[in-house]
Image (spheres, helix red, strand yellow):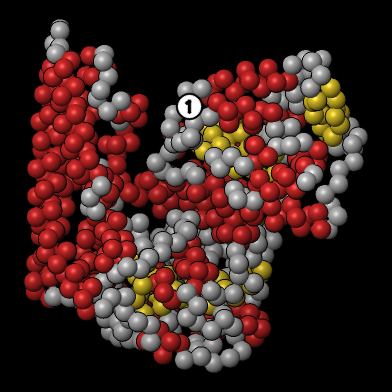
């Protein structure tokens, strides 16, 4: 087996998509590299090979000319004590020496990503050097310019989220930034966009934590007769197109044409676009909602009291539960909102999975992921402006978009437009734009059509008028309502009874958490008092720590704990991670004091969150006793 095959065999279990790209390159005969054009190989003073790149006619050495292995070992030494759950992003790969030493020093709980801006150097190494030990390491991921660069934005979000933003760092291998400045700038922008998106998610959790908890709990009354979205995969005819309608102001460019699509394509609209469609006399097939703070339905029902007649409601478990309660529809379809309680209902009671979909932070991103998962091969975007038009964010906006954006701390800036012009957008819209572009790069869909006819240009989508898209792809009639009506409920009668039993057990479970966290506060406060003494009794302190450990074990694996923890996330975020790593077992009294101070804050946050949960559970029980299963 030659080096190429050995390296690809090592890569395949870890990064199958990259291997597919490389195999295609080889099949097309584009895998060969001519030394002297973009790279050259030299020899260091100690006899080890060194890699040189040629940029702008100038040759740059990417390794030490004297002792490249020692240089790599020294560079890697800075990662000896890297924290658990860190994400280390390296600009540069070179001949793999640095990567090998970094991974040797590395931690099993750390994620490592390497971005190589020189395609030729990477291809040469695949053919001529055994890097199978590096490529087979499941902690590492590799991105290469002009090979799988576009996957960077698509896959890094699976490593970086709001929980590990402070532990995410970009490192640059020696000389790489000087040689590949533009590629480095592009890489930083990709990472920045992902972090901004993660921060937006974090801000949502902090700002709307009570609403998230409330929706998660109160939705329990509505899952008895709902459809599990996971089972909808493959339910629609493969040749049926889907139209995803968003609320951008350009929706008015083709609202009349959209009316013609009824029955020829699945029309799924985001909740903020529903009122515009109702006003135009158009009934979508499905309305999708994911936002815990989304407005109510008074304005929709004021336009049409039968707005949901024949319209299915697709929602996740953290969408505004008040909307769910007031929607009179023939079919509710539910998907996972990263909610452990609902997962328990489906996984343990229903013996089925419930899918959570990739999202870029907006309801339109979630809706696209759902349509893609369901198997639609042609998806047509309408109203997906991701920008402002005539000072409007939405078709029915009444306030100036730039003014509203400034009030919320957003900066307005220009991006390329649909028609080759420039349009104005802001940071959150821009992160959604980049998410769509990365999603388009890795999609299994055959046709992604941007029929917005305005707004921002979305790379990876084909611009086409809605009329032309319908003429080309929407050529058959379907009984879409019948298809949706025939979707089965997720649970049988026995399982529904188990769900009801769980609901009725919730008040007692809440009291259990309150007792545990109250005890945790008392123990931590006692530990703090003891640790302040001149000669603290370390045996008693360790005894307290063991008792706290028992409380952690008694609560952290319970179904409801993730929701309580999420409600307390702002406190958790502010507590230094290294203060909690020791678990209160440090021998040093000063360290013990810091640990107990953090634990007091944490248990109080858990206790307060559980008090909020108690009020919500009481509301659920009142609703359930009055109205029963929904």
Helix, strand or loop at disc 1?
A: loop
Kindly identify the residue that appears in the image at 64 percent across and 31 percent down: 99
Q: Check the image and report above or below for 500 versus 3.
A: below
Q: Is residue 349 at all visible to an observer of this figure?
A: yes
Residue sitting at the far front: 1
The residue lying at 76 percent from left, 58 percent from top is: 24
Determine whether, in the image, residue 602 is placed left or right of residue 52: left
Residue closer to the observer: 553 or 392: 553
Drawn side of residue 169 relative to residue 403, left or right: right
- Can residue 276 be seen here? no
With 61 as the anchor, is 325 left or right in this view? Answer: left
Q: Nearer the viewer, residue 230 or 207?
A: 230
Task: Return the x and y of residue 16 as percentages of the image width and height.
Answer: 63, 54
Looking at the rendering, which quadrant does residue 460 occupy?
bottom right
Query: Which quarter of the rendering shows the C terminus?
Result: bottom left
The foreground one among 527 and 299 is 527
Question: Residue shown at 14%/46% (left/top)?
Answer: 513
Q: Is residue 374 above or below residue 168?
A: below
- Across and down, in percent, residue 206 comes to 31, 46
Residue identifier under label 1: 82
At label 1, counting other C-alpha atoms closer than 10 Å, the crowd grade (few under 14, some 14-19, many 20 or more) is some
Q: Nearer the viewer, residue 299 or 206?
A: 206
Total tally of numbered discs in the picture: 1
Residue 12 locus on image (x, y percent)? 64, 51
Residue at 47%, 80% in the rendered image: 235
Residue 192 position by quadrant: top right
Q: Is residue 595 above or below residue 504?
A: above
Residue found farthest to the top:
534
Q: Position of residue 242 (x, y in %)?
A: 53, 77
């Amino acid at each position: 087996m030659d080096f190429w095959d050995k390296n690809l065999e090592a890569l395949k279990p870890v990064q199958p998509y990259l291997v597919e790209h490389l195999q295609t390159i080889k099949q097309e005969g584009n895998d060969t590299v001519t030394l002297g054009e973009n790279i050259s190989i030299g020899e260091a003073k100690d006899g080890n090979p060194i890699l040189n790149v040629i940029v702008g006619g100038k040759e740059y050495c990417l390794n030490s000319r004297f002792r490249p292995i020692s240089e790599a070992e020294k560079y890697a030494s800075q990662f000896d004590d890297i924290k658990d759950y860190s994400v280390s992003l390296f600009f540069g790969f070179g001949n793999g020496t640095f990567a090998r030493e970094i991974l040797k020093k590395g931690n099993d709980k750390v994620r490592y990503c390497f971005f190589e801006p020189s395609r030729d150097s990477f291809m040469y190494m695949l053919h001529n050097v055994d890097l199978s030990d590096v490529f087979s390491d499941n902690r590492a991921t590799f991105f290469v310019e002009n090979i799988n660069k576009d996957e960077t934005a698509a896959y890094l979000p699976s490593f970086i989220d709001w929980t590990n933003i402070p532990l995410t760092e970009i490192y640059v291998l020696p000389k790489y930034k000087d040689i590949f400045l533009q590629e480095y700038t592009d890489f930083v922008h990709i990472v920045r966009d992902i972090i901004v998106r993660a921060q937006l998610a974090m801000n949502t959790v902090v700002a709307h934590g009570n609403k998230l908890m409330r929706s998660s709990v109160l939705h329990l009354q509505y899952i008895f007769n709902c459809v599990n979205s996971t089972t909808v995969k493959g339910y629609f005819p493969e040749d049926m197109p889907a139209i995803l309608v968003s609320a951008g102001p350009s929706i008015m460019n083709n609202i009349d044409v959209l009316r013609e699509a009824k029955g020829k394509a699945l029309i799924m609209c985001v909740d903020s676009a529903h009122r515009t469609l109702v006003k135009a006399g158009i009934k979508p097939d499905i309305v999708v909602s994911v936002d815990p703070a989304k407005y109510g339905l008074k304005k929709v029902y004021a336009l049409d009291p039968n707005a949901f007649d024949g319209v299915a409601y697709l929602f996740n478990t953290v969408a505004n539960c008040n909307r769910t309660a007031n929607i009179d529809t023939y079919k509710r379809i539910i998907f996972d909102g990263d909610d452990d309680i609902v997962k328990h209902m489906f996984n343990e009671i229903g013996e089925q999975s419930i899918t959570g979909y990739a999202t870029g932070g907006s309801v339109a991103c979630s809706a696209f992921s759902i349509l893609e998962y369901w198997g639609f091969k042609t998806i047509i975007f309408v109203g997906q402006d991701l920008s402002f038009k005539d000072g409007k964010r939405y078709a029915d906006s009444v306030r100036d978009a730039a003014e509203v954006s400034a009030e919320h701390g957003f900066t307005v800036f220009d991006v390329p437009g649909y028609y080759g012009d420039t349009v104005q957008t802001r940071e959150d819209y821009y992160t959604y734009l980049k998410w769509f572009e990365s999603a388009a790069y890795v999609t299994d869909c055959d046709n992604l059509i941007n029929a917005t006819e305005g707004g921002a240009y979305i790379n990876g989508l084909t611009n086409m008028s809605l009329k032309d898209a319908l003429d080309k792809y929407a050529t058959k009639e379907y009984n879409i309502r019948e298809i949706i009506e025939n979707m089965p409920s997720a649970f049988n009668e026995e399982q529904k009874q188990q769900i009801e039993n769980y609901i009725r057990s919730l008040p007692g479970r809440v009291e259990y958490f309150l007792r545990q966290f109250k005890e945790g506060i008392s123990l931590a406060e006692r530990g703090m008092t003891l640790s302040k003494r001149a000669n603290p009794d370390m045996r008693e302190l360790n005894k307290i720590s063991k008792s706290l450990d028992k409380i952690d074990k008694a609560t952290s694996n319970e179904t409801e704990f993730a929701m309580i923890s999420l409600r307390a996330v702002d406190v958790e975020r502010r507590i230094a991670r290294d203060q909690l790593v020791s678990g209160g077992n440090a021998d040093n009294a000063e360290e013990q004091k810091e640990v107990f101070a953090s634990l007091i804050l944490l248990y109080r946050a858990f206790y307060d969150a559980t008090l909020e949960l108690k009020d919500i559970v009481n509301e659920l029980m009142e609703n359930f006793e009055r109205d029963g299963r929904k």
